[in-house]
Amino acid sequence: MLLPELKRLIEQMGKDRGINKEIITDALEAAMLTAASKKLGQKVDLEAHYNDETGEIEVFQFKTVVDKVLDPETQISKEEARKNLDEGAEPGDSLGIKIETNSFGRIAVQMAKQIIIQRVKDAECDNIYEEYKDRKGELVNGFVQRFEGGSIIVNLGRAEGVIPPAEQIHRETYKRGERIRSYIIDVKKNAKGSQILMSRTHPSFLRALFEVEVPEISEGLIDIVNVAREPGKRGKIAVRSKDKDIDPVGACVGMRGSRVQSVVQELRGEKIDIIPYSDDAAKYVSSSLSPAKVNRVFVDDDNRTMTVIVPDDQLSLAIGKNGQNVRLAVKLTGWNIDMKSETMAVAKEEGQEGENNLTKITGVGPAMAEKLFSKGIKSIAMVAATEPELLSSIPGIGEKTAQQWIETAGKILTEEVVNNKE
C-alpha cells in the first residue's frame, strides 16, 4: 500500500508522540493484514511488510506449488508458478504473490485505520507509564485542561494527570488553562490506558513543597520527621537539624517568613505550624500544640497518652477551632492527648469526671461513654482530637456519627472556654 509521503508521516508521528518507528510500521502491517483478510478471507496465508525505501506496505499471499490444484486460494500449479513467479518452482514450495491493496475496499481500509489508531494509542500509554511509573512522590506542574465528573484533568505535556475529588482541597476552584501544581500519588495501567493520579491534599504534598523551598532539606541538612494536615485549613510539620549550627525552624520559615509564605501561597492560605522535633516526647508534644503554651504534662507510657495542662487563657488556642489544633498534634506526634486547663486540672476523680463529661455529646449514653473510656478516650477533648477513622472502628459507631461527635466535642470545648472567660 503506497500512501502519500508515508515515510515522512511515520517519522513525524514518531517524533511528535515519542513512539518508536517500528511500533508504527508494525501497526501499519497489522492493519493491512486485517484489511487483506477481510477482502480475501481468513483461510489464505498472508504476510505484510513495510518497504522503507519505497514507503509502501506490501502484502503477499502465499500459495503452495502443486501438480494439481484442488484449492485455488491456497495452491498454485507448477506450470503457472514457473511461468509467472519462479522458473525453478517445484511442488511443495511456498511462493508469495503480491496483492494490489487498492482492491481492499472502503470498509477494510477503515478497519485498518482503527487498528493503527489503537496500536498508536497503546504505544503512547506504554510510554507514559514507563515515563511516570518511577515518579511517584514527585511534584509536577501542569495546566487545567478540563473537568470530568468532579475530577480535574491536568495537561502535563505529553501526558494527562487526574486529581480526583477526594484529592482536591475543599473550596479551591480552578479555571481551564490555569496553572496547577500537585503531587503524584500513583501511576496505574488499565484498560483505558495509563492513569497518573495526583493530589493536593496528601500530607506529602506539603512535605514536597518544603523540600523545594528549603535548600537545607533537599541537601539533607534538615529532616522532615512528620507532617499532619487538614487540607485547606491547617498543617503542621515537624523538623530536626543534622547540623547543630542550623536552626531547622528558622530555615523553614526563611528570611521574614519568605519560605513558609511561598508554601502558604501555593496552598492558598492554609496555615502552617513548623514544629521542632525532640526525642523528649513530652517536649515534642508540647511544641506540637503551638501556638499554645503548655504548663505541664503527665505521661502515660502504657497507653501512649499525655494529659497536657495549659493556662486557662491558652485552652482555646491549644484545642483550636472544633478541636483542630489538638487533632493535628495527635497526628503529628502519634500520642493521644487529653487537654485540660489549670481550672479543669484541679478536679478530683478525673476518670469518673471524664466518663460523665462524655455524655454531654449528643448520642453518647453511659454505655457508650464506658466503651469510649475503655478505649482510652477519656474526655471530650480526646474525642475532639480523635481521627474519624479511629472512632468509627469502635463497634456501634459509624463514619458519619464519628464525624458528628468530633465536631460536637470541638464545639462543646469552644463553648466551655468562652464560658470560663465570662
Image: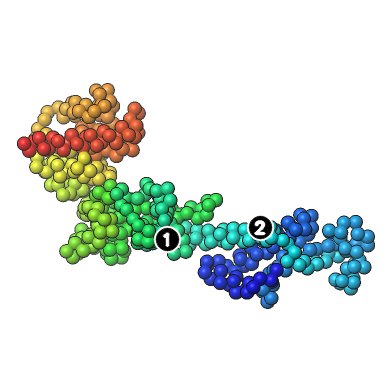
Above or below for 379 versus 124? above
Q: What secondary structure is marked by label 2?
A: helix
Q: Which label belongs to residue 155?
A: 1
Q: CA distance from mark 1 to mark 2?
A: 30 Å
Dot placed on the residue nearer the N-terminal end, 1 or 2: 2
- Looking at the figure, which quarter contains the C terminus? top left
On the image, the x and y values in percent for residue 149 come to 42, 48
Foreground mark, 1 or 2? 2
Total marks in image = 2
Q: Is residue 305 visible?
A: no
On the image, the x and y values in percent for residue 51 come to 69, 72
On the image, the x and y values in percent for residue 179 come to 35, 61
Residue placed furthest toward the left:
422
On the image, the x and y values in percent for residue 400 come to 32, 34
Crowd rating for badge 2 (residues with CA inside 10 Å; few <14, some 14–19, many 20+): some
Residue at 21%, 37% (x, y): give it: 410
Left of 341 or right of it: where is 182? right
Residue placed furthest toward the bottom:
53
- Looking at the figure, which quarter contains the N terminus? bottom right
Residue at 22%, 60% (x, y): give it: 261
Q: Which label belongs to residue 111?
A: 2
Crowd rating for badge 1 (residues with CA inside 10 Å; few <14, some 14–19, many 20+): some
